Image: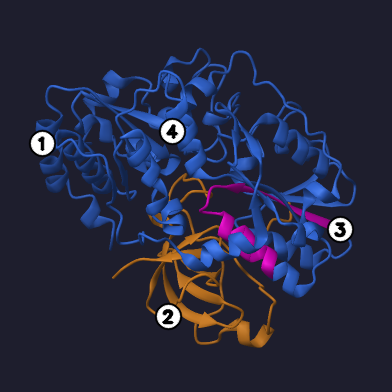
Chain colours: A orange, B blue
Amino acid sequence: MSHERTAGQATPRAETPPGAALGLPAVDAVAAPAEAGPACLTCGDEAVEVVVLAVEEGDLALVDTGEGRERVSVMLVDARVGDRILVHAGEAIGKVRP
Amino acid sequence: MKYVDEYRSPEIAAQLSSEIGALADGGHHKIMEICGGHTHTIYRHGIEDHLPDSIELVHGPGCPVCVMPMGRIDDAIAIAEQPDVIMTSFGDMLRVPGGRGSFLDAKAAGCDIRMVYSPLDALKVARTNPDRRVVFTAIGFETTAPSTAATLLRAAAEGLENFSVFCNHVLVCPAVQAILDAPGQDLDGFLGPGHVSTVIGAAPYAFVARDYGKPLVVSGFEPLDILESIYRLLRQRVEGRAEVENQYTRVVPWEGNARALEVIERTMVPRDAFEWRGLGTIPDSALGLREEFAAFDAERLFDLPGAVVEDPRECQCDEVLTGQIKPWECGVFGTACTPETPIGTCMVSSEGACAAYYQYGRFNRAAATADAGA
């Protein structure tokens, strides 16, 4: 199966945002945050709250899931570095109030 | 860990539990948790062990995998069987049985079916396979609809011609209304879904309180969130109120996420009707793609059987989904139907009521009570 996932693998570091290098709209590596336990991906639990490490071009952001780094879409929220955001299916749908 | 430790404090749980006990005294309270995520939390953390017997939790239809009718699975497989197609979907979908087997069965028979973690992953598959037609089977409530919508907008902006969506997004409020309209319905209140409400807000549930006189509390997913929400529901009942409250204010704005609603609105329209497993056909309860996105609409691009397929006779998912029976009361629970070889959808996703019971050993309630708090 040629399924690809970036979770747990080496992801580009925040200081070298790949969005800039790749240009729009090439979303090269997008994955849902790592799941803690057997939870359904379509309706999240606490594991989908992540912290924004870097905001990148193309409405993308590099986030810290607590278990690794992932790239998610932030088209629908105003994401800033340090924000805790709620991600569903690779898309941030809300911000967690500090 | 932030938002984990402070929402799992045993001391606060005990305090809430005793206050719930005092409020619940002398009555019977039948509360439905709409969202499968809540079902999962309730069984994972043994919440029922901390509630008095007078509180009965009923599992609602809020697991999108569980409410997928078999005919739609057959339609998706018919698409996957086209020789140039790569079918993509969430992992939970792969084991859902249709009338002719599941995605996994179709994969074993030679179809190219791939698991993705987001529709953006499916988009990437489309980019890297320009000579194939890549279809994403989209499921989910208003939580995942924004992700599909945003992906459609990205695909359109890129001019991707080999990507399409088989849209099965469903809407939570019409399902709640169908449950409230069902004959013999005797629910006393609802735990409202947390993450759906991040998108739609708490306001759309107003009809539950206004038209049906039932309280609804939008709840978070940690154990203390659930306990506090149950406490708030009971307090409403004791005080004779029926209102919509938002317990999950750290994530859910009352008005929802306007931008997420806007991308859904731009790409999708409500269908006249949609079949739900266990609930039947519900008007205006699902989303299809807008005419402007016809080029990305698998339903328009492929010939679909579109058949209505009856659930297996031995499956009692419909009764589980409407709260008439508990999972362990189903005739095939844990015997013919297990998470490895599910007969019904409730046993497929870990958010399904049956799978949650099965996973956490809740079919033996006495034993589970004994080791509660471990």
Counting from the top left corner in percent of width and height, residue A11 is at: 56, 73
**Which is more N-terminal, label 3 or label 4?**
4
Which residue is labeled 2 in the image? A80
Which chain's residue wears label 2?
A
Which chain's residue wears label 4?
B
Amino acid type, residue under disc 2 in the picture: Arg
Which residue is labeled 1 in the image? B18
Name the residue: 12% across, 46% down.
Answer: B11
Q: Across the whole image, how many numbered discs are drawn on residues?
A: 4
The reply to whether label 3 and label 2 mark residues of one chain is: no
**Highlighted range, magenta:** B132-153
The reply to whether label 2 and label 4 mark residues of one chain is: no
* Disc 3 element: loop
Which chain's residue wears label 3?
B
Counting from the top left corner in percent of width and height, residue B153 is at: 68, 68
Amino acid type, residue under disc 1 in the picture: Ser
Give me the C-alpha separation between circle 4 and circle 1: 26 Å
* Disc 1 element: helix
Give me the C-alpha separation between circle 1 and circle 3: 60 Å
Which residue is labeled 3 in the image? B132
Which residue is labeled 4 in the image? B60
Which chain's residue wears label 1?
B
Q: Nearer the viewer, mark 1 or mark 3?
A: 1
